[in-house]
Amino acid sequence: MSRPREFHTHSADQTIAVGRLLSTLLNPGEMVILRGDLGVGKTTFVKGLAEAFGAALQDDVTSPTFTLVHEYRGPEVTLFHIDLYRIDTERELATLGIADLRTEPGSILLIEWGEKFEQLVTESDGEISIERTGESDRTISFCPRGKG
């Protein structure tokens, strides 16, 4: 059983580096809830994951706040970065086809604001929380569900 892992960063570059490091703990087929306040660095963290999987360059990773889903295809993994901030109902959630995305070969789903929908939290394979602890400082915690 894995224990939660915690990292402290002091810059966006360090947050990206933690994303690269945590990529080694994620496997295709997993769905991970990304928790954190607005502007805390969730997309910055995803930049490191996408880069580590060869799915996108850092500059190509942007927030899916208005598009809701961004897809980054790598040679072995496809990252789906999903933002539910503007999704308010189960019906709106259903239109995103999250269950279908999860079964796509090689997919990893990273869902911001997933805690708004309890079924996503209980179905997820883990959670990454980012907390602002200073102007540039962050605490990043990875807790694999059922594994820690």
Image (cartoon, rainbow, N blue to C red):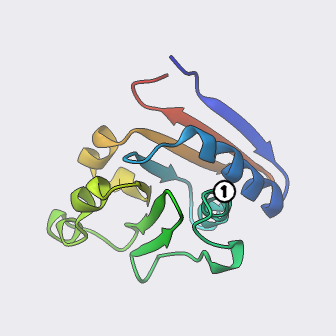
Q: Position of residue 69 (x, y in %)?
A: 40, 73
Question: Percent position (x, y) of residue 21?
Answer: 70, 45
Tag 1: Cα neighbours inside 10 Å, few (<14), some, or many (≥20)? Answer: many
Residue closest to the eye, 19 or 137:
19
Q: Which residue is situated farthest in the left direction here?
A: 91
- Callout count: 1
Let me know if residue 37 appears in the view.
Answer: yes
Q: Residue at x 66, y 56 (%)?
A: 52
Residue furthest out toward the top: 1
Q: Is residue 33 left or right of residue 49?
A: left
Residue 94, image quadrant: bottom left
Task: Answer above or below: position of 111 versus 3.
Answer: below
The location of residue 134, given as percent across then percent down, is: 80, 53
Q: Quadrant of residue 109?
A: bottom left
Q: Position of residue 45 (x, y in %)?
A: 65, 58
In this rendered view, identify the residue nearer to me: 21 or 127.
21
Residue at image point 22% right, 60% down: 100
**Type of amino acid at the residue the image marks with label 1:** Ala
Q: At 61% across and 74% down in the image, what residue appears?
A: 61
Residue 136 visible (yes or no): no
Secondary-structure class at tag 1: helix
Q: Name the residue tied to disc 1.
A: 52
